[in-house]
Image: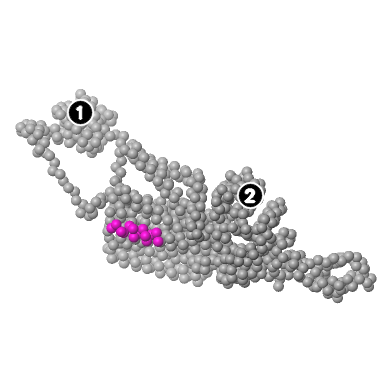
Amino acid sequence: MNGMNGLRQAWLVAVREMRERARSRAFLASLVMIVAVVAAMIVLPAVLLGRDRSVDVGLSGATPAGLPATIEVQASAVGTTARLHTYATRAEGEDAVRHGTVDVLVVDGRTLEWPRSVDQRVEAVVSGAIQVVAIRDRAAAEGISPRQLGDLVAPVPLTNVELSSVAGRTSGDQTATLVMTGLLVVIISSYGGLVLTGVVEEKTSRVVEVLLARIPPRSLLAGKVMGIGLLGLAQVAVTAVAALAAVTAVGSLDVPAIRGTVIAWLVVWFVLGYALYATLFGALGALASRPEDAQSAVAPMSALMVASYLAAFAMVAQPDSVAARAISFFPSTAPLAMPGRIAMGSPAWWEPLLALAITVASIAALVRLGGRLYAAAILHGGPALSLRAAWHAAKESQPAHPRPIRRNTVNPAETTRYRVTVTILMLVGVVLGVGVGAATSDVIVGVIAGAGFIALTVQAFKLWTGHGGATVTRT
Amino acid sequence: MALLEFHAAGKRFGEVAALDGCSFTARPGRLTGFLGPNGAGKTTAMRAVFGLVRLDSGSVTWHGAAITAAVRARFGYMPEERGLYPRMRVREQLVYLGRLCGQPAHEVERSVDGWLERLQLAERGRDRVDALSHGNQQRVQLIAALVNEPELLVLDEPFSGLDPIAMELMAGLLRDMAAAGATVLFSSHQLDLVAGLCEDVVIVDHGRVVLAGELEALRAAVPERFVDITFTGPAPDWSALRATPVETSDGHARLRVDSLDDIQALTSAAGDGTSILSLSFEPPTLSELFRRAVAT
C-alpha cells in the first residue's frame, strides 16, 4: 500500500512537471524552433539541389543523326530529363551558354563547350550519348545489326564484396549509428539538464520542505525524472513526425532504411539512458544550494557522459570486439553503445536483453540511492555540500545540518592533501594513457584513455571533498 | 488518546545535540505553544514529526502508534522556511499539494476553494504565486498546510513577519482549527501572543523540555508571586519582608515574593507610619515563566 502510494505520488509529481513545463512559453518556443530547424534542414537542401533537375543541352553544327534522341534516353537513365536547344550558328550557341540558357553546347557532335568548369553530371549524359551514337554508326558500317550490337555490349553483372563488413551490415548502418549515438547524448544531456535545474529550483524556492513533508524523496526524484522524460519523449516524437512529414513532402531524399526493431530499441534506450543520467543529475543537483553551484555539482557526471560517448563512438568501428561488447553492458555506456550494435546487427538476441536488465537494475538502485542523497542534502542551505558530507548524512538518514557538516571552507593542510591527491591522479592518468597507447599502438586511444581517466577521477574527487572549482580559491 | 507524543526523542548533529531526551505531548482541541530560545531544537522536533529528521533515539507517536506515511497524510505542516513554486498558479499549486496527501481531486478542490474564499483570495486563484503581495503569499502558504483538513497542524513560527491584521487572522484560524478538534502545535518567540492564545505550552532548551503543561496551572504552580502594592508613608524595608523589589516609585512598588507566606508578611508591613492602600498579587506571566525556565 505504501509502495502504491509512492507510485501514485510520483505520478502526481510527473503530471505537474509536464503541465507546468508544457505551458511555459520557453518550452513551446523551443519546440517550434526545433521542428522548424529540422524541417528546414530536410526541405532546404532538397529544394536547392532539386531545383535544377533537368539538363539543358545546346546543339550546333553537324549533329550526328540520332544524338538528340540518345541524349534524352541517357538523361532519363540517370533520373533527369534533357531539354534540347538547336542553334543555327556556333556563336549563337556560345551566347546561350554564356547566358546560362543551356548547360553545355555540343559543336559538331565532338566539342563540348562549358560556361566555366565541366559539370560532371551533364558531361556523363552528353558524352555517353555521343559514344553510343558513334559505336552504333561504326557497327552499322561493319555490318553489325543493332540486335547483334546489343548482345555485344550487354554488361556483365558484377558483385561488390566489402571484406571488412559483416553480412547485412552496410556503411549506411555505421553512419546511422554515429548519428543515433550523437542524438542520444544531446537529448539525454538536455533533458537531464532540465532535471538538474528543476531540483535546484525546488531547493532554492524552499518548496522542497513542504513537499518532503508529504512524499518520500525518491517519489519526488522519480516523478520529476519521469515527467520531464515523458515531455522529452513527446518533443522527440513531434520532431520525428515533422521530419518524416518533411521527407515525404520533398519526396526526394534517400532515407536510410532503418529496421523497425532498431527504432523500437532506440526508443527503449533513449528512455533508459535518460532515466539513468537524469537520476544522477537530480541526485547530484541536490548537493547544490544555488543555481550557480549546479553545474560544478554535476561536473563529474558530465565528464562520465563525455567519456561514455567517446567509448561508444570508438566502438562503431569494431562493434564485435570484446571492448565493444563490454561497454554495451556497462550501465553508463550501455544506452549509448547498445543501440549502435543493434543497428549493425552485432549482438546475439540475448545481449540487448541482458544489457537492458543491467541498466534497469542500475536505475532502480540509483533512484533509491539518489533519494537518500536527496533527503540528506535537500534541507541543507548555504554553500554546496560535498558528496562525502551528504553521503555520511545519508548513511544516518538525516538531513545534513549546517553546523556539523563540513563545508567548503578550505584549510591549508587539506589543500595540500587535495593537491597531492590530484597530482597523483594525474600521474596515474599519464601512465595509463602511455600504457594504453603502447598496448594498442594507437596514440589517440592512449590520449583518450589517459585524459578520460584524469577528467573523471579528478572531478569525482573534487565532488567528494567539496573542492569545487570556484570554492577552492575562497578562504 | 488522540495526541502527539514525543518520547525521549534524541537527535545529534555531529557534536551538537539538537534533541536530548525531549518528551512532551500536544492534545487535540487545544493550542500548544512550543517555546524556546533559538537553537533549542524546536525546528528539529517539528521536522521529526514529518520524517524530515530521523531520530537517533526515542520516538514520536500519534494516537500511541508510530507515524507512517498514511498517518502523515492527515497532518499539516508550515515550515519556518516558507516556500512555494513561485511561477505556479495559486489554486493549481494548492490542489497539487493537497493531492500529494492522497485525497481525491474533487475533495481537494472543494477544500482549496473554501480556504481561498475564507482568506479573501478567491479572485487570486488563477494568479501566479510570485504575482501576490508578501502578505497574500503567507496566506497561500497557510492554506497549503490546511488543504487536507489536518488532524494535526504543526506550524514553525507562523506569526513571524505578519502584520497585526494578518496576526489576528492567523490567531483566529488556529483557534478555529483547535475548536474543530485538531491538535495544533506551533512555535513562536512572541510570548505575549502565545500567552493569550494557548491553553498549553512546552518550553524547550538545549533539546530538553524544561517546562510543559497547561499554562494557567504552570503559572499557579510556581510559588513565586508578583505583588503590586500602593501605600502612604515611608517605604518599608522590603528585603526584611523577604520581598524583592522589581520596580519602586513614590507610594508604589512591584515586588517579587518567593511564596504565598511572604505575602502574609507583607500585609503586616502596615503600621509604623506606613499604611497600605491597595495590594494585589498575581502569578508570573509566561515571559517570566520562560525566563525562569530557560535560565536554570
Q: Which quadrant of the figure has residue A340?
A: bottom left
Q: Secondary structure at mark 1?
A: strand
- Between A440 and B173, the one nearer to me in the picture: B173
Vertically, is A250 above or below B114? Answer: above
Relative image position of residue A429 (x, y in whole percent):
37, 66
Relative image position of residue A159 (x, y in whole percent):
17, 47
Q: Give the residue pinned by disc 1.
A: A59
Q: Which quadrant of the figure has residue B19?
A: bottom right
Indicate the amino acid at tag 1.
Leu
In this picture, residue B258 sits left or right of residue A150: right
The residue lying at 88 percent from left, 65 percent from top is B278
In this picture, residue A144 sits left or right of residue A162: left
Numbered label attached to residue B115: 2
Which SS type dominates the magenta stretch?
Answer: helix
Q: Secondary structure at mark 2?
A: helix
* Mark 1 nearby-residue class (10 Å; few <14, some 14–19, many ≥20): many
Vertically, is B283 above or below A191? Answer: below
Vertically, is A402 above or below A201? Answer: below
- Between A333 and A215, the one nearer to me in the picture: A215
Q: Chain of mark 1?
A: A
Q: Is residue A205 visible to the viewer in this orientation of the structure?
A: no
The residue lying at 29 percent from left, 46 percent from top is A257
